Amino acid sequence: MRGKLLIIGFGPGSFQHITERAREALQESDVIIGYNTYVDLIRGLLTDQEIVRTGMTEEVSRAIEAVRQAELGKKVAVISSGDAGVYGMAGLVYEVLVQKGWREADGVEVEVIPGISAINSCASLLGAPVMHDACTISLSDHLTPWELIARRIEAAGMGDFIVALYNPRSGKRTRQIVEAQQILLKYRPADTPVGLVKSAYRDRQSVVLTTLGEMLDHDIGMLTTVLIGNTSTFVYDGKMITPRGYQRKYTLDKAEQPIRANERLKEEHEPWALHGGVSERKKETTQALAQQAVAMLAERGLLQTKIIEPNTNNPYDAMPAILEIAVSPGVGNKKLSARQMTALMTAAGAEGEIEYTPHHYVLLRVMTKEPEQIVSQLEQAGLLVQPIGDVVQVKACDFCNGEKSQSIPEADEIAERFAGLTVPKELKIGFAGCAMACYGSVHEDIAVIYRRGKFDLFLGGKTIGRNAHAAQPVAEGIPADELVDTVGRVLAEYKEKGHPDERFHKFFKRIGSVAGYHHNEHVPAVTVDTVCGD
């Protein structure tokens, strides 16, 4: 029997906005595969179908499982909120099929069922903001380099597009929405209307009308869609409206039009159209707008000495960058000196941010055109500077204020070799200088515990969440001269075989064996027959 893949977009989540074909497809399916939240949203439409639920970052696993089940002859529904073809599962399912050499003529059947995308559902709650040329841009840089995203925002600003920003901010991605705002402020005024819609047509729906200059004063998260108007968008009676252009050609308050239909195409009635190429007046207007943008940025202190020319090839190059780094007094040292505190305050300046974290470092965020100079000044003050994001970070105990110093050299070497290494998802190595592991090392992705002159290795911890758990003990008594290479082999395999955005504990469970260490579903309690210090 030939199986079938039904890739379903079910819209914003309310039953009223799910299409009839989507409902039929859910009913005729044998298997439903989707992200946990999406399955919960449509549970009322399901009967006795087999349900495969996964977490937020397991899209690849969902797609592979869907294809596998369809190849067994089943009808498999892969669900996405919004439209399955707009940041949804449709493209990924096709990619998996292509990798397998699928052909439509003799392979499993595929049907993509459209749904209402977030740009449409959110626009309907705001009024009529998407009445002209518009674009959608995801600010998530997990799968797309930020430099490319920034160029797309730049192009949208230059083209005066209405912009819908998807995935604008998460707990760990905070700078992207700030940079997007700064780029767009070069091309449109600060009072440009902006709509912030969270959970459209769901129980916790929130609609906020603000401006481009003030939008960061409001709560923006992963469930928010940010709709930014173009230069003609206006607000009337709480509604965000973008004119289509009829007011240029027609008199909107009169039934009888003064200009005949055949006259509307004349240059005097359509001076903005391409009648004879770009006029000198248009060039002057463009230059004036560019100069206004430069002046506005200078007033806000976002430009220093470099001026953006109207015809520059890369105006974004003139913008200061947002430097975001993790700063600590050292791998094991937890004490900041007065000199180091002064260096931090100087680096932050009047507009920067210093955020304390539970991971024994502080986050420094500052807008600058000289990030290398700031990093150099911090390092000269004796501070350890590490990148943040999807990289390796080393989190060590304080070695009992340095009294148990036997394993500090190994901790320093691990930090020197691996801190900042790019990996599929942010990874923390917890290092403990004795078997008490009082800084919670065994709950990190990788834990190294010093005990009786050698090291124990733990893999796959999960620090937070309802199913938080300690890492699994996989090796005891690793000699000091083998430790760093052992950790390196684990990291190398994760870097090579991990899926994008896949956390280490999920990778360890999926692959079953990493660097020769095997995953166990049930972890027995660990008995430590030693007192602190042995």
Image (cartoon, helix red, strand yellow):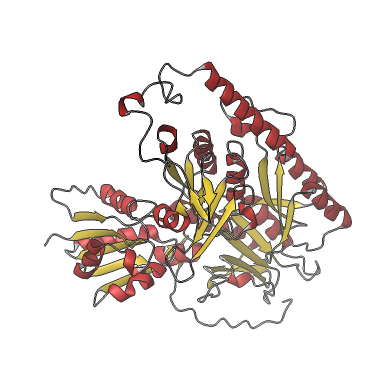
Determine if residue 365 is in view: yes
Q: Tell whether 70 sits left or right of 299.
A: left
The residue at the far right in this view is 338
- Quarter residue 457 falls in: bottom right
The residue nearer to you, when weighing 306 against 245, is 245
Quadrant location, the N terminus: bottom left
Above or below for 204 versus 251: below
Q: Position of residue 222 (x, y in %)?
A: 51, 59
Up-down relation of residue 300 to residue 456 (above or below): above
The C terminus appears in which quarter of the rendering? Answer: bottom right
Marks counted in the figure total 0
* Residue 217 vs residue 109, the one in the foreground: 217
Task: Give coordinates of residue 341: x percent, y percent.
Answer: 84, 55
Which residue shows up at 62% across the image and 42% down it? 182
Position of residue 191 measured from the top left corner of the image (x, y, whole percent)? 61, 45
Residue at x 63%, y 24% (from the top left corner): 309
On screen, 185 above or below 521? Answer: above
- Quick check: can you spot residue 500? no
507 sits left or right of 283 in the view: left
Q: Residue drawn 59% across and 40% down?
A: 183
Q: Is residue 27 above or below residue 245?
A: below
